Amino acid sequence: MNRRFSGFALAVVVFTLILPAAYAGESPYQAAPEAPSYFFCTANQSQREMPDESISPAKAFYSGAFTAQPEKMQPVMSAFGDLLKEKYGFTPDAGQVQPVACTGVKSMEQAQATEKLRVESSRRNKAEVIETGWIPAA
């Protein structure tokens, strides 16, 4: 019985000494912060009949390309929408909950190229294109 007890005691001592060493230096998991992405934002306004019965053409508004953290885009979209309302008299189409959309890509060059393609597409579709050049404050 002494042998059995001493083996058990030895196992307890080993686990007591080794186990804490295995966990020393570990800390709770923290995800790495998301890397910044490259974005541009757009908002569209459909063709509308004006009070004088003329027709206002569809409009496509574009920001400039910029860097931002993906998880912080909601305030950016709101700020771009506010700029459009204040400076250009933008009003969303009926039923649009979030009229501003932002597209994210992996490089500044890709953001600029993608935005250029979208601007060209808007023009081909006869929309009045407004390139605001707006980027969020740092």
Image (cartoon, grey):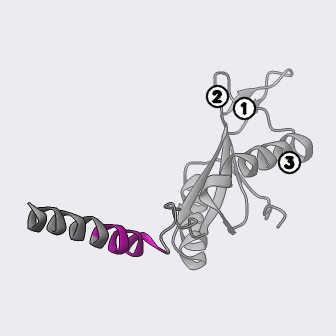
**First-in-chain label (1 vs 3):** 3
**Residue type for callout 3:** Leu
Q: Are marks 1 and 2 in contact (CB under 8 Å)?
A: yes
In the picture, measured across the screen, residue 122 lies left or right of residue 64, that is left
**Quadrant (top left/top right/bottom left/bottom right) for the C terminus:** bottom right
Q: For the magenta stretch, what is the residue range?
A: 15-24
Q: Are marks 2 and 3 in contact (CB under 8 Å)?
A: no
Foreground residue, 50 or 70? 70
Label 1 and label 3: CA atoms lie apart by 13 Å
Foreground residue, 130 or 54? 130
Dominant SS of magenta comes to helix
Residue occupied by mark 1: 92
Residue occupied by mark 3: 83
Please tell me how crowded label 2 is: few (under 14), some (14-19), or many (20+) other residues with Cα within 10 Å. few
In the picture, measured across the screen, residue 9 lies left or right of residue 35, that is left
Q: Position of residue 37 (x, y in %)?
A: 58, 67
